[in-house]
Image (cartoon, grey):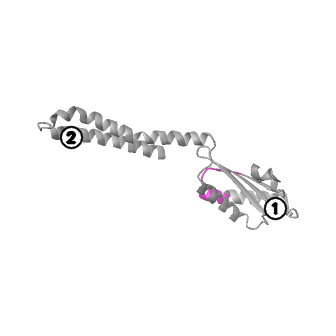
Amino acid sequence: MKVDAEGWIVNAAISSAVLLAFVAIWMIEGSPYEHIAPYIDPVLVLLVVLISLSVPIRMAWTALMSLLNRAPPPEITEQVTTIISNSLEQLPVNELFVRVIQPGRVRWILAHVVLPGDYSPEDLGALDRQRSETLEALKENYRNVILDMLFTTERRWGAPINESSKL
């Protein structure tokens, strides 16, 4: 819908320029400025093209960055981290590492939850239920989400590469 809306804006600008050109030519016919009438339409078309050119360039750049698995804006990653942290309140979390990529409309989230070494869940199903609760919390805010949540007691499995190489 966003692409369609931007397309409508470009089409509205083009239509407005055509209308403006007709009105301008009509107004200067028979006036001392009649000699510039042949230049009005090309100048307005050039202005519309220059103004409208940013729309397809921006759309192509966004699509390219999505294809390259570029991370979404930092605000989104912070929101995702907050939602996951809130959903893990009942667990004794030592650290949480969250990574988010967004190829297209789908948001892929990888969360490494570092728990204390002496933590024992009641059963493996408890951790699966926690994943489900976290996914539901994320889906309340984001429509297309894929969550991969890993539980570990060793920080090295979740820490960013530059941090885990120090371990």
Q: Is residue 71 magenta?
A: no
- Are there few (<14), some (14-19), or many (20+) residues within 10 Å of tag 1? some
Residue under the image location 16 percent in, 39 percent down: 28
Where is 91 relative to 74, above or below? below
Picture disc at residue 115: 1
Nearer-N-terminus badge (1/2): 2
SS at badge 1: loop
Where is 110 relative to 115, above or below? above
Q: How many marks?
A: 2
Residue under the image location 59 percent in, 43 percent down: 104
Q: Nearer the viewer, residue 147 or 38?
A: 38
Tell me if residue 125 can be seen.
Answer: yes
**Left or right: 64 as drawn, with respect to 90:** left
Marks 1 and 2 in Cβ contact (< 8 Å): no
In x, y percent, where is residue 66?
59, 42
Which residue is the site of mark 2?
Answer: 24
Indicate which label's residue lies in the foreground, 1 or 2: 2
Amino acid bearing label 2: Ala
- Are there few (<14), some (14-19), or many (20+) residues within 10 Å of tag 2? some
Q: Nearer the viewer, residue 11 or 167?
A: 167
Q: Which residues are magenta?
A: 136-147
Amino acid bearing label 1: Leu
Q: Is residue 140 magenta?
A: yes
SS at badge 2: helix
In x, y percent, where is residue 76?
60, 55
